[in-house]
Amino acid sequence: MVFKNLKPKSSNKSSKSIFVDTRPDGTTIFICHNVNQVEKLNKLFTEKGNIPIGYEEWDEGKDKKYIVTYQIENVNTPVIRN
């Protein structure tokens, strides 16, 4: 699955989609291409009660990618925060 950018700018060719992979263990992995995508995902998913459980940076320069893993919570289960 791939999240398309909501409002892609035709002049910005470096704007790439976020790749999404859902795993059988209930985790979802997102591969982002820039820090702004990571920040938007983090805000969106943590506001909905999902828990970030992993973060990695791959490569360097223009090939750099950010891999963020979330535990997607069941909407019927209350989230307990410390």
Image (cartoon, rainbow, N blue to C red):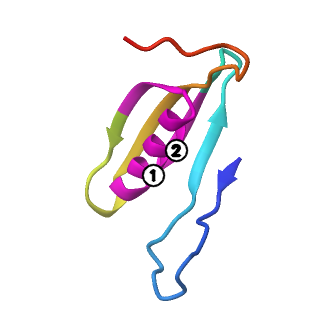
User: What is the x, y in percent for residue 82?
Assistant: 36, 11
User: What is the x, y in percent for residue 22?
Assistant: 67, 31
Identify which residue is drawn at 56% across, 76% down: 8
Question: Residue 48 colored magenta?
Answer: yes
The three-letter code of the residue at mark 2 reads Leu
Instruction: Name the residue tied to disc 1.
Output: 40
Q: Provide the secondary structure element on which disc 1 rests.
A: helix
Instruction: Name the residue tied to disc 2.
Output: 44
Real-space Cα distance between discs 1 and 2? 6 Å
Q: Quadrant of residue 78?
A: top right
Write the start and end of the magenta stretch as one range: 28-55
Question: Residue 53 colored magenta?
Answer: yes
Which one is in front, 63 or 31?
Answer: 31
Q: Say if residue 59 shows up in the picture.
A: yes
75 on left or right of 71 = right
The vertical placement of 79 against 41, above or below, is above
Identify which residue is drawn at 62% across, 43% down: 20
The vertical placement of 11 against 38, above or below, is below
Disc 1 vs disc 2: Cβ atoms closer than 8 Å? yes
Identify which residue is drawn at 54% across, 27% down: 50
Q: Quadrant of residue 57?
A: top left
Which one is in front, 67 or 79?
Answer: 79
